[in-house]
Image (tube, rainbow, N blue to C red):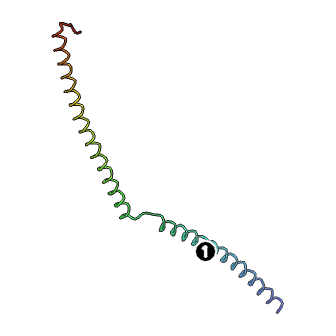
Amino acid sequence: ELTEHNTVVDKKLDELTEHNTVVDKKLDGLTKGQTENRTMIEFLVENAATKEELHTEIAESEIRMMTHIDGFMKLHTDLKGEVVAVQSHNQRLDSHINQLADHVKLELQ
């Protein structure tokens, strides 16, 4: 009867040992998963931008773009003024050439 009892106890111990092995494997998996999650969270904390940082960056980009656009508009205005001046100069030269041609009785085409 004692031998029979020992056999039953040994079987129960074996079952408990197997169960403990399964639980240990699951815990190892959880620990590994927690480590991976912690690593991802740390990466995000170190590298992700906050809303405030994004808003600041966007606002700064808008200011830079507006500054460049203003610069291009000034260049366009300056160039437009220079084109008008060159056209006026060309008209005066054409007028002088026509006067000279009339004076020397030269027909221009």
Amino acid carrying mark 1 in the image: Thr
Query: Quarter holding the C terminus?
Result: top left
Would residue 77 be found to the left or right of residue 44 on screen? left
Would residue 61 be found to the left or right of residue 13 on screen? left
Query: Quarter holding the N terminus?
Result: bottom right
Q: Residue at x 25, y 43 (%)?
A: 74
The one nearer the camera, 31 or 3, is 31
The one nearer the camera, 14 or 58, is 58
Classify residue 14 by image quadrant: bottom right
- Residue 33: image location, x then y, percent: 59, 70
Q: Residue at x 82, y 93 (%)?
A: 2
Residue 64 sits above or below residue 73 on the image = below
Q: Residue at x 54, y 69 (%)?
A: 37
Classify residue 87 by image quadrant: top left
Identify the residue at the far bottom of this view: 2
According to the picture, the residue beneath numbered tag 1 turns out to be 31
Would residue 22 be found to the left or right of residue 55 on screen? right
Residue 47 sits above or below residue 7 on the image = above
Would residue 35 be found to the left or right of residue 92 on screen? right
Q: Sort mark 1 into few (<14), some (14-19) or many (20+) by Cα contacts within 10 Å.
A: few
The one nearer the camera, 55 or 26, is 55
Classify residue 32 by image quadrant: bottom right
Give SS at disc 1: helix
Q: Residue at x 67, y 74 (%)?
A: 25
The one nearer the camera, 80 or 99, is 99
- Residue 92: image location, x then y, percent: 18, 23
- Residue 107: image location, x then y, percent: 20, 7
Residue 100 sits above or below residue 64 on the image = above
Count of all numbered marks drawn on residues in the image? 1
